[in-house]
Each structure stands twice: as C-alpha cells, then as structure tokens.
Image (cartoon, helix red, strand yellow):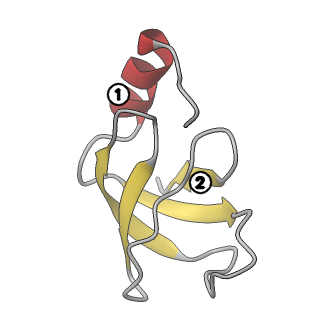
C-alpha cells in the first residue's frame, strides 16, 4: 500500500472537500468504462489519498492519488 505524507493528505482534503464537483481528466485503469470528462461529486478522501467520488454515470470508483487525474468543476 502506498503512503502519503500528512501534509499531502491535508492538502487533498482541503482541495476536495465532500460535495466538490469534479471531472475526470485521466484514469489509469484498463478495466473501467469511465472516460475523460465524466463528472461526479466527492464523497470523501481516505487515509491513503484516494478521492472517493459518486459519479453521475452511477460509478463510485475513486481517483487514486498520484495515478489518476481529476479537476474541480468551477
């Protein structure tokens, strides 16, 4: 299991609080049907930095810190 610093975890939780709308930029998962541009709402950030998202398409696959890329929808 990959670990991240307490400072990085605090930054992620500040950047992606519960309820934040996000959009998928890139996901490194060959088994997902998610595509660039898929949107969703942040549920929480866990202790290893995975941003858990309820996606508009029905998926709940999280974005893994350092692997997947999401951006806030402004």
Q: Position of residue 72 (x, y in %)?
A: 50, 50
Pointers 1 and 2 in contact (C-beta within 8 Å) = no
Q: Toward the viewer: 41 or 3?
A: 3
Q: Is residue 38 left or right of residue 55?
A: right
Q: Position of residue 42 (x, y in %)?
A: 33, 56
Q: In the rendered view, tell whether residue 64 sits above or below residue 29.
A: above
Quadrant in which residue 10 is drawn: top left
Please report the residue visible at 44 percent of the width from the left and 34 percent of the height from the top. Answer: 48
Q: Toward the viewer: 32 or 11?
A: 32
In terms of sequence position, does the residue under pointer 1 or pointer 2 come before the other?
A: 1
Q: Is residue 19 left or right of residue 46?
A: left
Q: In the rendered view, tell whether residue 52 sits above or below residue 56.
A: above
Please report the residue visible at 66 percent of the width from the left and 53 percent of the height from the top. Answer: 68
Quadrant in which residue 35 is drawn: bottom right
Q: In the rendered view, tell whether residue 23 sits above or below residue 38.
A: above
Q: Position of residue 38 (x, y in %)?
A: 56, 77
Please report the residue visible at 70 percent of the width from the left and 74 percent of the height from the top. Answer: 36
Q: Position of residue 62 (x, y in %)?
A: 46, 60
Quadrant location of the N terminus in the rendered image: top right
Residue under label 1: 14
> Are there few (<14), some (14-19), or many (20+) residues within 10 Å of tag 2?
some
Residue under label 2: 70
């Amino acid at each position: 299991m990959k670990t991240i610093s307490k400072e990085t975890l605090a930054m992620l939780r500040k950047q992606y609080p519960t309820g934040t709308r996000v959009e998928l930029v890139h996901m490194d998962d060959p088994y997902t049907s998610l595509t660039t541009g898929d949107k969703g709402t942040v549920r929480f950030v866990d202790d290893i930095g995975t941003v858990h998202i309820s996606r508009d398409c029905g998926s709940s696959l999280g974005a893994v810190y350092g692997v997947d890329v999401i951006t806030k929808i402004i």
